[in-house]
Image (tube, helix red, strand yellow):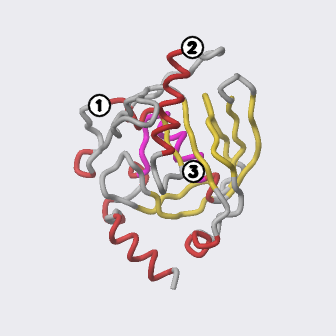
Amino acid sequence: MKNENNISLPQYVTLKIQTLNSSEDKTIRIKAKTLNFPLSAEDLLDVSILEKKYDQEENCAGLAAPQIGISKCIIIFAVHENEELKKWRPDLTDTMPKTIWINPSYKPIGIDKHQDYEGCFSVENATGPVARYKKIHYHAYDINGNQIQGITEGFLARVIQHEIDHLNGKVFLDYVAPEKIMSKEEYLEKRKKAMK
């Protein structure tokens, strides 16, 4: 698929529920490469490709480079104020505009976790409840090598943890018991009922 700048955008690397630990492209299951600064021209192109892939999605909280076959520590995400979503996700307290992080990491603040449903472009038609730390301290770099750090909680903390998992070869279903997995259709129906 090509975008308006004629850059060919890669397809998602996907896993099937039945074969979570096997994929034709192992990029999604290995630890991604830490990048050095200044970023190379190739690294900057990969950042651009990831951003364009993210921008073409309508409902995408975040993407990590390994999801599109690029084994590098790059993530992109955004969490905006959304009153509709708050009906389903009351933990949507912190927000952040579209952000690209290089070499991100986090440390939990406390041991409290919150369980909520997650989905992913890298897992075919599945959602499931995942317990994530409620509050984290994050650390990353922007594309110019400037250090970024802070504290966040709630849904934003969940998104950051989910995307960083991809950089470590993990997907959300690694944390979900098989009997708790449901299709996206079942999840949307459940969400619709809860929001009435």
- Residue 116: x %, y % from top left: 52, 64
**Is 6 drawn above or below residue 116 in the view shown?**
above
Residue named by callout 2: 40
* Residue under the image location 48 percent in, 58 percent down: 130
Quadrant of the snapshot with the N terminus: top left
Decide: marks 1, 2 in contact (CB < 8 A)? no
Tell me the magenta residue range.
158-172
Is residue 126 found left or right of 162 in the rendered image? left
Residue named by callout 1: 25
Residue named by callout 3: 159
**Is 85 drawn above or below residue 142 in the view shown?**
below
33 in magenta = no
Q: For numbered disc 2, what is the local secondary structure?
A: loop
- Residue 114: x %, y % from top left: 59, 62
Is residue 138 found left or right of 55 in the rendered image? right
The numbered mark, 3 or 2, whose residue comes first in the sequence reads 2
Please rate how many residues cluster around mark 3, counting C-alpha atoms within 10 Å: few if below 14, some from 14 to 19, many from 20: many
* Residue under the image location 61 percent in, 49 percent down: 78
The numbered mark, 1 or 2, whose residue comes first in the sequence reads 1
Is residue 194 found left or right of 97 in the rendered image? left
Q: Quadrant of residue 190?
A: bottom left
Please rate how many residues cluster around mark 2, counting C-alpha atoms within 10 Å: few if below 14, some from 14 to 19, many from 20: few
What is the magenta segment's predominant secondary structure?
helix
